[in-house]
Image (spheres, grey):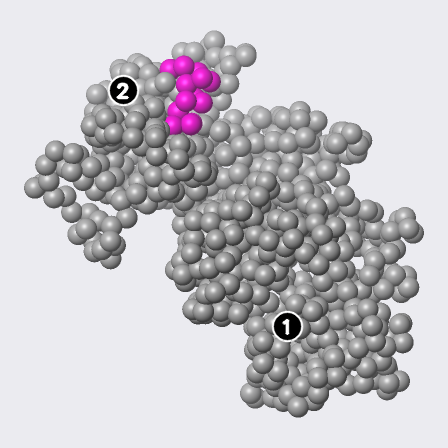
């Protein structure tokens, strides 16, 4: 079964199962599109009122309503700026219920108006729309059908992709000359293209009401783009009980502080809290573009004012799920378009069923064909972005499983990802892709798995050019096979570079399922997708270390601040590693951020919880976890909340010291997120943590960057914080008495960025470092980088390599590493450089 056929089979199967549900959901959604307008038209005198000279004051209006309903306490009052609109009074919910009754009130007389007719009809319609009037069971059915609708959109687009994809007419024009089955397919696919974007928005927002986890994820995503604000001081603190609410004075204070508004709701303060008004502007973006104004209950002075227009775009989206789902986020035209799209949902169920019934006669032959072909799981087509092809070659299924995990991580990062078996491709097919990730195992004596052997043979004889392909390789193997360890992954890497492909990062080798190597691969995938905060597949088992030093190395630098970090283990036995190894750090939130979250959620951080059999406080668990939406967490059982938290992913740093130095040292540049906040790991190490704080850390072996075992010449090349890994290797060489070392290092300015200059110059003066070339790109009008220093010293570099030198490169993958690679290749030739890599004489630790 081909991939396309597999997608098609799923498309029609889901269509004949979920299509009826989606048709019902679509029709009911269309009926609800103009619910408020219809109710207003159907209820004159209830949803609209007769104009009179003067309205009652808010205080008098509440008093008259309370006199008519002495049996229920009033909890809120909504007024409208429209002169013919009723006021709305909200009553406190009866005990045991979540919501109280809401009644329209004549703002001129204070009379309670009759309940609107047809409200029950629309309430039932809403229940059908959201859960098929079947409570939780119906909710799950609708939720699953909504997910299937997303699949319909993506798979339908894939299945109908025309050859003339650049022609709008081909995509959007209906051809009424089509007949029979061709017309049905044409109608199904073309109209589906018309409404595809609307359906994607509807479904992605509709999941908000179906799944709590989805709602929480959207909230986290929305809030991740907002600046962290200091908590508002408790307006009630140490002032006792506030005076009774003066409703008229509160409204006057609101109108004095708020801009022109269309509707505003006063919520009665609870437990002496702030007086809160939620209002819409006079010309709001949509019906959920609410603003919030809080007043001090004693002085009625504003204490907080949150404006919809001041929110970031993520917060606006996160707070506008209903408006997006209904289409009103895009104005009245959006409501009309979404209503029409909803009404068209039965069209796809009907045409899909008709196409299925006409095709059913050929299903027996299709099933016979499927039994003849090795079944492979269908690849999911991601929502957006340039596609990344993830290719697997697996003997036992391990590599295939991690290929799917890789694709899932890419999709979560917003990249489109397709998964294919390597055996279904030919080397020529690789040229059609800009980026590919290979997840491969080795079978037998360094051979390809059975399914990929034909590809391996064709690739060996392939002499085409793949200069437009960038790739990464995750190679599974077992070191017990000696020289054949990861043999196929290594051969694949060599052949791809031989035909001009460019590695996205160095090959990652997994010895017997080593979780640290898999985390390293996931680290690379996070860098590729731009989303580095996805949970680790297998979190490290951290040790406890203490922050002993946190020193800024480059004050005044035009680049980001770089820090010398020193850590000491609580267990002295942990003070062991080799030069070239990597520190996996478990980042934490700063204590102030955790305290702010706890205050917003109304929870006590000192409460004891048990996670993975270990007793600790809620604050400690929160510090190392993704923080959920505090409003959603409010009132949650503390233990259940702690168990639901997702841990923060690890961060990797090259170790810059040896155990004999007495501390694990790092060179960390503080990175910034898109919102300007410090990076997760670098922000924790350089700003969030203070001297003496506990740091979660695990050392990961990185044998691919350990120093040469023998006394051979060594060229060390790097830039920026890549000096960390080179420094450790250089220290190990000096400790071993190997002094034929040459360091070429690039940074921005000599005045600010000459990291560890005194140490390097001492080694140079003592002969432990034979040559030191430092390049500072900003110290001359024409930018000069470390690769230029390599090219300028070409003759000497060639002599060192001819004498058996090894070359170690550490630093940035973008710019430096490929440029240095090209410079070396131009000096000694690509084949020589490839041979050095195969022999372990050319090693890189780039990121």
Q: Is residue 347 above or below residue 650?
A: above
Query: Foreground residue, 617 or 166?
Result: 166
Checking the image for residue 464, the label placed there is none
Q: Which residues are magenta?
A: 133-145
Secondary structure of the residue carrying numbered label 1: helix
Estimate how packed mark 1 is, as few (under 14), some (14 to 19) or many (20 or more) residues with alpha carbons within 10 Å: few
Residue 349 location, quadrant = top left
Query: Foreground residue, 610 or 443?
Result: 443
Q: Which residue extends farthest top?
A: 71
Q: Given this view, does label 2 or label 1 mark the residue nearer the observer?
A: 1
Q: Position of residue 180 (x, y in %)?
A: 12, 33
Q: Position of residue 694 (x, y in %)?
A: 81, 48
Checking the image for residue 46, the label placed there is 2
Q: Position of residue 11 (x, y in %)?
A: 33, 34
Mark-to-mark CA distance, 2 and 1: 85 Å
Magenta stretch contains residue 139 = yes
- Number of numbered markers: 2
For the question of whether residue 728 can be seen, the reply is no
Residue 316 location, quadrant = top left
Secondary structure of the residue carrying numbered label 2: loop
Q: Is residue 662 left or right of residue 14?
A: right
Mark 2 vs mark 1: which is more N-terminal? Answer: 2
Q: Position of residue 533 (x, y in %)?
A: 60, 48
- Type of secondary structure dominating the magenta stretch: helix
Q: Residue at image x 47%, y 9%?
A: 71
Q: Is residue 704 left or right of residue 454?
A: right
Q: Give the residue pinned by disc 1.
A: 835
Query: Foreground residue, 54 or 814?
Result: 814
Q: Residue at image x 63%, y 42%?
A: 537
């Amino acid at each position: 079964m081909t991939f396309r056929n597999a997608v098609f089979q799923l498309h029609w199967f889901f269509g004949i199962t979920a299509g009826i549900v989606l048709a019902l959901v679509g029709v009911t959604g269309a009926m609800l599109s103009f619910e408020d307008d219809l109710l207003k038209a159907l209820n004159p005198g209830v949803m609209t009122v007769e104009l009179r000279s003067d309205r009652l004051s808010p205080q008098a209006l509440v008093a008259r309503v309370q006199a008519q309903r002495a049996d229920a306490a009033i909890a809120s009052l909504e007024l409208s700026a429209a002169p013919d609109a009723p006021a709305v009074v909200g009553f406190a919910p009866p005990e045991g219920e979540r919501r109280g009754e809401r009644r329209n009130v004549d703002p001129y007389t204070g009379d309670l108006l009759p309940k609107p007719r047809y409200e029950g009809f629309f309430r039932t319609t809403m229940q059908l729309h959201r859960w098929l009037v079947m409570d939780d069971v119906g909710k799950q059915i609708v939720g699953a059908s909504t997910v299937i609708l997303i699949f319909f959109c993506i798979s339908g687009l894939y299945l109908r992709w025309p050859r003339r994809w650049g022609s709008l007419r081909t995509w959007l024009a209906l051809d009424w000359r089509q007949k029979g089955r061709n017309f049905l397919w044409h109608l199904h696919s073309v109209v589906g293209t018309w409404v595809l974007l609307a359906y994607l928005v509807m479904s992605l927002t509709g999941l908000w009401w179906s799944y709590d986890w989805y709602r929480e994820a959207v909230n986290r995503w929305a809030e991740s783009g907002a600046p962290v604000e200091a908590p508002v001081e408790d307006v009630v603190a140490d002032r006792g009980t506030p005076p009774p609410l003066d409703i008229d004075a509160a409204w006057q204070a609101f109108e004095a502080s708020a801009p022109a508004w269309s509707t505003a709701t006063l919520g009665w303060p609870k437990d002496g809290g702030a007086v809160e008004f939620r209002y819409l502007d006079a010309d709001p973006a949509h019906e959920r573009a609410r603003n919030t104004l809080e007043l001090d209950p004693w002085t009625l002075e504003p204490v907080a004012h949150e404006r919809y227009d001041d929110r970031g775009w993520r917060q606006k989206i996160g707070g506008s799920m209903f408006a997006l789902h209904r289409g009103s986020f895009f104005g009245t035209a959006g409501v009309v378009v979404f209503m029409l799209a909803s009404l068209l949902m039965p069209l796809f169920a009907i045409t899909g069923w008709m196409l299925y019934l006409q095709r059913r006669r050929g299903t027996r032959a299709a099933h016979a064909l499927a039994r003849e072909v090795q079944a492979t799981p269908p690849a999911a087509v991601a929502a957006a972005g340039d596609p990344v092809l993830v290719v697997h070659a697996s003997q036992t299924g391990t590599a295939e499983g991690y290929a799917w995990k890789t694709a899932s991580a890419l999709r979560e990062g917003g990249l489109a990802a397709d998964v294919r078996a390597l055996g279904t491709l030919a080397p020529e097919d690789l040229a059609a892709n800009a980026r590919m990730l290979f997840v491969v195992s080795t079978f037998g004596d360094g051979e390809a798995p059975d399914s990929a052997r034909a590809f391996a043979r064709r690739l060996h004889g392939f002499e085409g050019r793949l200069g437009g392909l960038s790739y990464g390789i995750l190679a599974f193997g077992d070191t017990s096979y000696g020289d054949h360890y990861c043999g196929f992954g290594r051969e694949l890497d060599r052949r791809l570079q031989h035909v001009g492909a460019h590695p996205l990062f160095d090959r990652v080798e997994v010895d017997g399922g080593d979780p640290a190597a898999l985390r390293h691969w996931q680290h690379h995938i996070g860098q590729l997708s731009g989303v580095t905060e996805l949970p680790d597949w297998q979190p490290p088992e951290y040790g406890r270390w203490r922050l002993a030093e946190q020193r800024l190395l480059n004050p005044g630098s035009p680049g980001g601040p770089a820090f010398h970090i020193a850590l000491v283990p609580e267990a002295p036995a942990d003070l062991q590693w080799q030069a070239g190894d990597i520190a996996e750090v478990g980042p934490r939130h700063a204590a102030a951020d955790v305290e702010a979250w706890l205050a917003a959620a109304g929870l006590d951080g000192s409460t004891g919880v048990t996670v993975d059999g270990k007793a600790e406080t809620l604050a400690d668990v929160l510090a190392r976890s993704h923080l959920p939406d505090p409003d959603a967490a409010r009132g949650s059982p503390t233990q259940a909340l702690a168990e639901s938290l997702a841990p923060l992913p690890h961060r990797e740093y090259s170790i810059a010291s040896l155990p004999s130095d007495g501390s694990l040292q790092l060179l960390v540049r503080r990175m910034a997120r898109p919102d300007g906040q410090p990076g997760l790991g670098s922000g924790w190490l350089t700003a969030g943590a203070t001297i003496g704080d506990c740091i979660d850390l695990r050392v990961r072996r990185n044998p691919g960057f350990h120093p040469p075992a023998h006394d051979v010449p060594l060229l060390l090349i790097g830039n920026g914080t890549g000096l960390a890994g080179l420094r450790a290797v250089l220290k190990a060489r000096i400790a071993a008495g190997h002094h034929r070392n040459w360091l070429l290092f690039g940074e921005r300015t000599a005045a600010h960025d000459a990291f560890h200059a005194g140490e390097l110059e001492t080694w140079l003066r003592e002969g432990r470092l034979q040559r030191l070339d430092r390049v500072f790109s900003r110290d001359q009008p024409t930018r000069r980088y470390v690769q230029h220093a390599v090219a300028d010293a070409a003759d000497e570099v060639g002599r060192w390599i001819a004498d058996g030198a090894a070359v170690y490169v550490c630093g940035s993958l973008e710019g430096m590493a490929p440029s240095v690679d090209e410079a070396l290749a131009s000096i000694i030739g690509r084949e020589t450089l490839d041979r050095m890599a195969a022999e372990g004489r050319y090693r890189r630790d780039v990121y």
